[in-house]
Amino acid sequence: MRVRVANVVTIARREYLVRARTRSFKAATIFLVVAAVLVTLAPLAVRWLDRDSSAKVGVHVSTTLAFDPIARLDTTINLPATPGGKGPFTFSTVADPTAGRDAVAKGDLSALLEVARGASGDLAFTIVSKDGPTLRIPTVLRQGSSVLATTDRLLRGGYPADKLDALGVPPSVSVVGPTPPKPGDQPKDFAGEIGSVLTGQALVIFLFMAIILYGQWVAMSVAEEKSSRVMEIVLNAASPFELLAGKVLGVGSLGLTQYAMAIVPAVIALLLQDRIASLVLGETAASGAPAASGLTPALLLAFAVLFVLGFLLYAVLYAAAGSLVSRIEDINSVVAPMTIVGMAGYLIAVYTSSGLIPADAGWVVVLSYVPFVSPYLMLSRFAAGLAGPLDLAIASGLLVIAIIVCLWVAARIYAAGVLTYGQKPSARALFTAAFARRG
């Protein structure tokens, strides 16, 4: 089959320019740019909103203690507070527990910590709060209660009171992988690990949205021309394969343009977070601004490769599916199977990166090489440091092979479907269109 490159380029340029001039594309691009920047600066916005807020916790002690529980809680829980700044919790003594519970009910107190002594002699605690037991305030107070109980046991056992503060100094703890680091490798800190996970999740979300959105653009473009009978005129000048290739390349280029316009400002905002924090929060708060350690050139390259290959794989099938319907209203039903497969890969990738699914599970590793879901899973594993350049190369090679096979199948379905009107697509029709002999 002879392919005229000039026809492919002409169709791609037309597809690009027509959609780029629409109001919906311009509005979506502006929204995407603003959303990307806002998501990037979200941690900074949360810190700005929380700069003057402090959870008010009342403490009622109904037993005798050899130490000041307020000072102990303040030293332990407010330890990460910036010098000269306010800690996340403000503790005060409450003489009447009934009044303290009423204050929690009215919202005057965030929580009430009741300290008593149990039958065994150890301290027993009751946390009164409107929040559930797994939320932030009860969780932190539960940790603080453990500190108070340990302090009480040490003092009753004869531990020197003047050495209690030294117990609050956290030990040096390092988390390393099973493979020894190579010379010159920089150890990852906790913030860097969190940054990598959050950045990986954001890129997986962007990847899923791009593939689904731009794939549907391809399908809708085919259905629009088919419903208006423009397809019959276009096919007089270009072959079905040239038309398929032009539409995929045109929409793909438009998608890359839109995402570049969104990612570039987001990256700039990410790199300038320290300066923005200095202006918004003050000089001392800038040191606590989130770092851009999760975003690396290697991760951006992996995202670009998987975006292009994943889009090409889905787009050729979306175009073939769009050629089977004569009305735009039928697009969602005919592309539903591909959307479901993409959604499954996306959800597994998100659950893996968040820890709900073990990232080293055998079936997850295998699926990260399977086309249709590998763009999401391989990107998630690569961002988490569980996959390297060789894994990315193998997954990309399998994607290229899948694209070639799907392109051959899609081209045959597309050639048979673009001039078919008034027929509902069926599995038998798809099989016949893809594998029937051509004269």
Image (cartoon, helix red, strand yellow):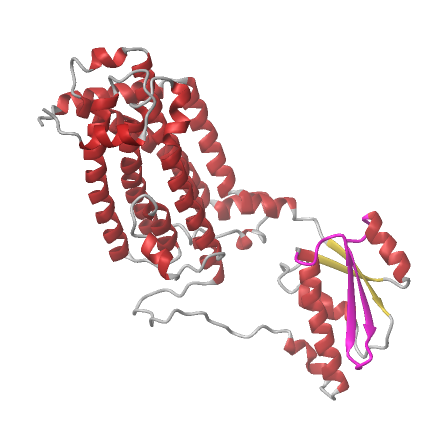
What is the quadrant of the N terminus in the image?
top left
Q: x and y percent of residue 203 in the render?
A: 41, 44
Q: Position of residue 103 (x, y in %)?
A: 85, 53
> Can residue 257 be seen?
yes
Residue 296 in view in this figure: no
- What's the residue at 19%, 22% (across, down)? 240
Q: Would you place residue 357 above or below residue 5 in this image?
A: below
Q: Quadrant of residue 230?
A: top left
Q: Is residue 166 toward the left or the right of residue 127 in the image?
A: left
Residue 267, image x, y percentages: 41, 42
127 inside magenta stretch: yes
User: Is 265 placed left or right of 129 in the picture?
Assistant: left
The reply to whether the magenta stretch includes residue 327 is no
Q: Quadrant of the C terminus?
A: top left
Measured as percent of width and height from the top left, residue 436 is found at 17, 30
Q: Which sits in the foreground, 79 or 190?
A: 190
Residue occupying image coordinates x 37% and y 50%: 377
To which quarter of the image does residue 204 belong?
top left
| Part of the protein shown in magenta | 107-134
Q: Residue at x 62, y 45 (%)?
A: 48
| Residue ranking furthest to the bottom | 158
Nearer to us in this view, 37 or 123: 123
Q: Residue at x 19, y 15 (%)?
A: 235
Q: Is residue 68 above or below residue 27?
A: below
* Picture quadrant of residue 135: bottom right
Give the total number of marks visible in the rendering.
Answer: 0
- Does residue 163 appear left or right of residue 343 in this picture? right
Q: Residue furthest front?
A: 428
